[in-house]
């Protein structure tokens, strides 16, 4: 078993051995010069690199995420254990000779852990005390001053000067302290915070159970929603792309009004339908429901429609649009299932609308005629490709992930509140 030797003009030359530190032979020390032990160059008494330490270093280098400097120190110790000289180690690993010396010295004076870990680095004392850092965090989490929409590093630095005895606080000091606390007061997320109550849970599980049902041609599940779109026309014709040059579009454009897209999506088969209209009133919704029942799915006995809580999405819209007998005839074949409020992500058609926007609508379309033609072509291609949405969220996963949000049943069953179901059958 080899021993790690440490040499240098500062601390002399020692060998780690079982009985104590011994003077190395001349060929290992580079000469017969020997430095007597002193306070700054002690005579070391330590053990040699054993098999356990060697295995630990090999395991460290074999895989896992580690700091680059730690891996280099492990390589230095293994190379030294193999008998390589300081110059050979420095050249092969790509470090300086002083790095090799310091790593070996810390191993000889301490242990393997001391040789691998980082030593405290010299630096200026932190300018902000613990209380002042807490004050900075509290200030960054508070409302910004009057006339400002958000805190900036400069504003926070000035506020610290006002609230403390410091004559000045740099922008970098504020940035580092905020980074340590993972704070970015100049940013905010727009977030929909739903109220998860019994009604929310009932509607969510109702929709998820529909998605989990096996396909039934007689009782299809159709997701329905609408999406507005602006009609943007070109003022000047774009310049087509050519080798070495991107397509060029003029920054000026013409507004040609708005349109609306009604989108249907079958949950259990690769079918979708996009209808372009000029509005999304109750009349338009009623016409879509009649077309769904009589044109698109005439053989279905009952159509389960998943939709959101828009005011026009109601049975009353059909009575506003058609005679009572016709409205009643259409509604007998429809069954509305509403997603919870502030939970449109549960409507599978939202994903399909995102695909439509990315693949077809991410450009300027200036007329409703062109919009109709382009969406029809996209619809035909996607249906021909038999594209489907792979829905992964189930009732079981909802109960596992949202267990804390689920309402707790009351102990006395006689006083349990009745929850109104979201299924509306006509």
Image (tube, rainbow, N blue to C red):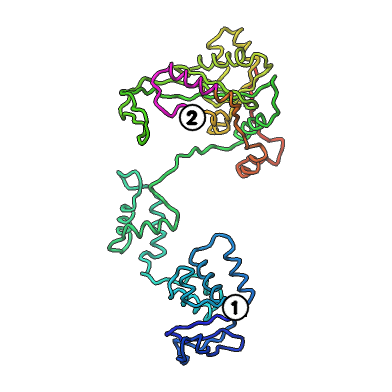
Where residue 37 sits: x, y (%)? Answer: 47, 91
Where residue 372 sits: x, y (%)? Answer: 47, 18
The residue where tag 1 is placed is 49
243 lies above or below 271: below
Residue found at x 40% / y 23%: 365
Element at badge 2? helix
61 lies above or below 345: below
The quadrant in which the N terminus is found is bottom right
Instruction: State the separation of the CA atoms marked 1 and 2.
Output: 62 Å
The image quarter containing residue 52 is bottom right
Q: Residues within 10 Å of mark 1 (few under 14, many from 20)?
A: many
Disc number at residue 131? none
Q: Residues within 10 Å of mark 2 (few under 14, many from 20)?
A: few
3 lies above or below 142: below
Majority secondary structure of magenta residues:
helix
The image quarter containing residue 170 is bottom left
Which residue range is magenta in the image? Answer: 355-380
Asked if residue 245 lies in the magenta stretch, the reply is no
Q: Are marks 1 and 2 in contact (CB under 8 Å)?
A: no
**In the image, 421: left or right of 127?**
right
Q: Earlier in the sequence, mark 1 or mark 2?
A: 1
Element at badge 1? loop
Front-most of residues 117 and 137:
117
Where residue 157 sits: x, y (%)? Answer: 32, 56
The quadrant in which the C terminus is found is top right
Residue 113 visible? The answer is no
389 lies above or below 158: above
Residue 210 visible? The answer is yes
The residue where tag 2 is placed is 359
């Amino acid at each position: 078993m080899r021993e790690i030797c440490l040499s240098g003009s500062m601390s002399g030359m020692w060998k780690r051995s079982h009985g104590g530190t011994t003077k190395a032979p001349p060929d290992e020390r580079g000469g017969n010069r020997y430095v007597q032990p002193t306070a700054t160059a002690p005579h070391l008494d330590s053990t040699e690199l054993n098999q356990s330490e060697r295995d630990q270093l090999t395991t460290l280098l074999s895989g896992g995420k580690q700091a680059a400097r730690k891996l280099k120190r492990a390589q230095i110790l293994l190379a030294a254990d193999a008998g390589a000289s300081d110059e050979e180690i420095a050249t092969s690993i790509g470090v300086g000779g002083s790095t090799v010396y310091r790593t070996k010295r810390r191993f000889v004076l301490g242990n393997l852990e001391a040789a691998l870990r980082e030593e405290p680095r010299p630096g200026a004392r932190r300018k902000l005390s613990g209380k002042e850092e807490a004050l900075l965090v509290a200030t960054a989490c508070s409302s910004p001053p009057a006339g400002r929409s958000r805190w900036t590093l400069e504003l926070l630095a000035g506020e610290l000067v006002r609230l403390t005895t410091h004559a000045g606080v740099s922008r970098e000091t504020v940035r580092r302290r905020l980074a340590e606390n993972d704070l970015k007061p100049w940013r905010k997320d727009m977030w929909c915070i739903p109220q998860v109550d019994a009604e929310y849970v009932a509607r969510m599980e109702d929709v998820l159970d529909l998605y989990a049902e096996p396909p039934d041609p007689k009782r299809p599940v159709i997701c329905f929603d609408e999406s507005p779109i602006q009609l943007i026309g070109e003022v000047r014709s774009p310049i087509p792309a050519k080798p070495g040059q991107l397509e060029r579009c003029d920054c000026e454009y013409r507004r040609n009004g708005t349109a609306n897209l009604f989108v249907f999506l079958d949950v259990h088969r690769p079918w979708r339908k996009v209808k372009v209209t000029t509005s999304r009133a109750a009349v338009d919704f009623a016409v879509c429901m009649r077309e769904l029942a009589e044109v698109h799915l005439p053989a279905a006995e009952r159509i389960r429609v998943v939709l959101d809580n828009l005011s026009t999405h109601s049975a009353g819209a059909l009575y506003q649009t058609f005679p009572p007998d016709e409205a009643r005839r259409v509604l007998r074949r429809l069954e509305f299932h509403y997603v919870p409020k502030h939970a449109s992500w549960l409507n599978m058609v939202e994903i399909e609308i995102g695909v439509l926007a990315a693949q077809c609508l991410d450009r300027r379309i200036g007329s409703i005629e062109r919009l109709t033609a382009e969406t029809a072509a996209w619809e035909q291609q996607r249906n021909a490709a038999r594209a489907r949405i792979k829905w992964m969220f189930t009732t079981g996963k909802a109960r596992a992930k949202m267990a804390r949000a689920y309402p707790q049943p009351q102990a006395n069953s006689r006083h349990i509140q009745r929850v109104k179901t979201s299924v509306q059958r006509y």
